[in-house]
Amino acid sequence: MSDLQNANPTIYTPTPVPTTRKARKVFTGKAKKQPKGVMHGDVPVDGMEVDADTDADSGVDVEEIDAEEVFDLIRNINDPEHPLTLEQLNVAQPHLITVTNPPTPSPTDSTALPHIDVRIVPTIPHCSMATLIGLCVRVRLMRCLPRRYKVDVRVREGSHASEEQVNKQLNDKERVAAAMENQSLLDVVNRCLATAVESEVVA
């Protein structure tokens, strides 16, 4: 890609994944194609691989997810500009992920739903790829997490010149849904996510 915004980004050494985490199966149910209109956190995920877990409705105990496991899902997403992962660029960091698992989740109370908050760190303050990267993170989690989880993706406070605008785009349900209907954009997202999917196979 020509005219790179950050031609020489700082590259960080990835942290090895402990064997115990590699071996652990985080999510229940088998991922399968969902029919058009299936929702995840009120966002359509048409044609995407999502977890088929039905949570409390199934009467099956579901193991809770922690921040490390969420990080494992997004660490190997590829940057749109460089052949480097979000972990290598320090865009995704474990300590910037918060997972809240309420003791008694309620489908009618949004404050009592399991919640995942991910903060990403653009490599430069004026990075125009921040929204695309955030969308990749959101789509990756939408495809992998049980539907009971509410997901928010934001840029870390003070890390981007247009922080408020980027955060609004990333967490606007209608904008995310519209993005998923744009085949060209979805193709770009899928290319960025390919390395994350491949890493699961290798692990």
Image: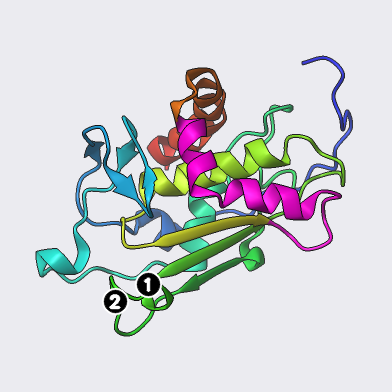
Residue 91 lies, with reference to residue 26, above or below; the image says: above
| Residue of label 1 | 113
Per the image, label 1 sits on a secondary structure element best described as loop
Magenta stretch holds residue 169:
yes
Which color scheme is applied?
A: rainbow
In the image: residue 188, left or right of residue 51: right
Mark 2 packing: few (<14 Cα in 10 Å), some, or many (20+)? some
- Which residue does the image show at 46% across and 32% down from the upper left? 180
Whole-number angstrom distance, CA of label 2 to CA of label 1? 6 Å
Amino acid tagged 1? Leu
In the image, farthest residue toward the top? 2
What is the quadrant of the N terminus in the image?
A: top right
Please provide percent x and percent y for residue 162: 81, 48
Can see residue 13?
no
Amino acid tagged 2? Ser
- Which residue does the image show at 54% across and 59% down from the upper left? 152
In the image: residue 122, left or right of residue 146: right
Tell which of 183 and 94 is nearer to you. 183
Tell which of 58 and 181 is nearer to you. 181
| Residue of label 2 | 106
In the image: residue 122, left or right of residue 31: right
Magenta region: which residues?
Answer: 155-180
User: Badges 2 and 1: C-beta atoms under 8 Å apart?
Assistant: yes
Residue 140 lies, with reference to residue 19, above or below; the image says: above
Please provide percent x and percent y for residue 106: 29, 76
Can see residue 56?
yes
Please provide percent x and percent y for residue 16: 58, 53
SS majority, magenta: helix
